[in-house]
Amino acid sequence: LASLTSLAVFDVSNNQLVGPIPHGNNFNTFEEGSYLGNLGLCGSPLPQCGEDDKPMTMPPTRRSEDEGFLTEWKVVMMGYACGTVIGMAWGYYLVFIREPFWVVKCVTKVELAMVKLFVKRGVRRGRN
């Protein structure tokens, strides 16, 4: 970015940026307001970095354990809900919209297998 020759508007406020602001063609022309809310930035027009040119450290953000746990469960429940809705829609489509020939085929195959098994064993119908 420092090598750009023309840049009319530049605003990186509140982006949690860290490090020294580059020196170059246009970066020297922007005001301090363009960099507000970035506690880790330093250099002109903001306060200078330390002697070793290291950026100021950002304060650590605290996130409660419960917040992470709830976020994970929200994702799991959204996936479960989507899967349930899609599964029920497919089930409805296969059974009620489309004529269930596949059910008839499955039942017929099972019935034929049972008949063949009974014929092999010599099972007779009726009384002896």
Image: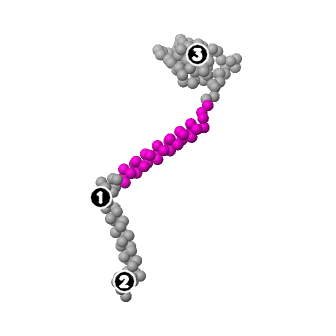
| Amino acid residing under circle 3 | His
Image check: 104 left or right of 8?
Answer: left
Is the residue 103 above or below the residue 55 in the image?
below
- Which is more foreground, mark 3 or mark 2? 2
Whether label 3 touches label 2, CB < 8 Å: no
| Amino acid residing under circle 1 | Glu
Front in this rendered view, residue 68 or 15: 68
Residue at the spot of label 3:
23
Residue at the spot of label 2:
124
* Secondary structure predominantly adopted by residues drawn in magenta: helix
122 drawn magenta:
no
Determine which quarter of the picture holds residue 56. top right
Q: Secondary structure at mark 1?
A: loop
The residue that appears at 56% across and 36% down in the rendered structure is 67
Task: Of the two numbered discs 3 and 2 on the same chain, state the one appearing first in sequence.
Answer: 3
Task: Of the two numbered discs 1 and 3 on the same chain, state the one appearing first in sequence.
Answer: 3
